Image: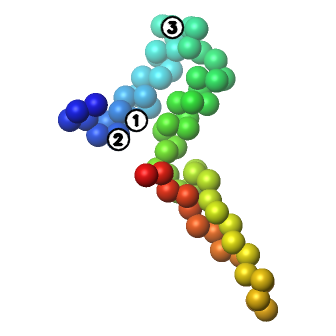
Amino acid sequence: MCGTDIDTFKQIFRDHWESFKAAYPRFDTPDYDTAVQKMLDCGDPEKMGYVQCRCLGLDRSIAQQPMLAY
């Protein structure tokens, strides 16, 4: 999409996904909803997966590092 950033693309889906599904009911399925939600969540560290590391030393601490999409 030359000249259009991903935030613009996501905003179009946020603003129009429900009305699109109403106009085209074949897209109103949990599978499509899941795919659209994953696309909207992409880049949000709170909603993406993470790597969890446990220190095997004395403190047994756990660290979480968000996985970033590149």
Q: Quadrant of residue 38?
A: top right
Q: Are discs 2 and 3 less than 8 Å apart at CB?
A: no
Q: Earlier in the sequence, mark 1 or mark 3?
A: 1
Secondary structure beneath dot 1 equals helix
Q: What is the crowding at mark 1: few (fewer than 14 residues within 10 Å), some, or many (at least 20)?
A: some
Residue located at (49% from left, 45% from top):
42
Where is 19 relative to 67, above or below?
A: above
Q: CA distance from mark 1 to mark 2?
A: 5 Å
Above or below for 22 versus 1:
above
Q: Is residue 19 above or below residue 44?
A: above
Mark 1 and mark 3: span between their CA atoms? 19 Å
Kind of residue at badge 2: Asp
Residue topped by disc 2: 7
Front-most of residues 41 and 54: 54
Residue type of the residue flagged with mark 3:
Tyr
Which residue matches tag 3? Answer: 24
Position of 25 with respect to 12 (left or right) is right
Looking at the image, which residue is at 79% across and 92% down?
58
- The residue closer to the viewer here, 12 or 65, is 65
Label 2 neighbourhood size at 10 Å, few (<14), some (14-19), many (20+)? Answer: few
- Secondary element type, mark 2: helix
Amino acid on which the number 1 mark rests in the picture: Lys
Mark 2 or 3, nearer chain start: 2
Q: Residue furthest left?
A: 3
* Residue that numbered label 1 is attached to: 10
Residue with the most extreme bottom position: 58
* Residue 37, horizontal then vertical, whole percent: 55, 35
Distance from the alpha carbon under mark 2 to that under mark 3 = 24 Å
Residue at the image position 35 percent from the left and 39 percent from the top: 6
Given contact means CB atoms under 8 Å apart, are the residues at marks 1 and 2 in contact?
yes
Instruction: Find residue 19 and report its horizontal and vertical position in percent.
Output: 47, 16
The location of residue 23, given as percent across then percent down, is 48, 7
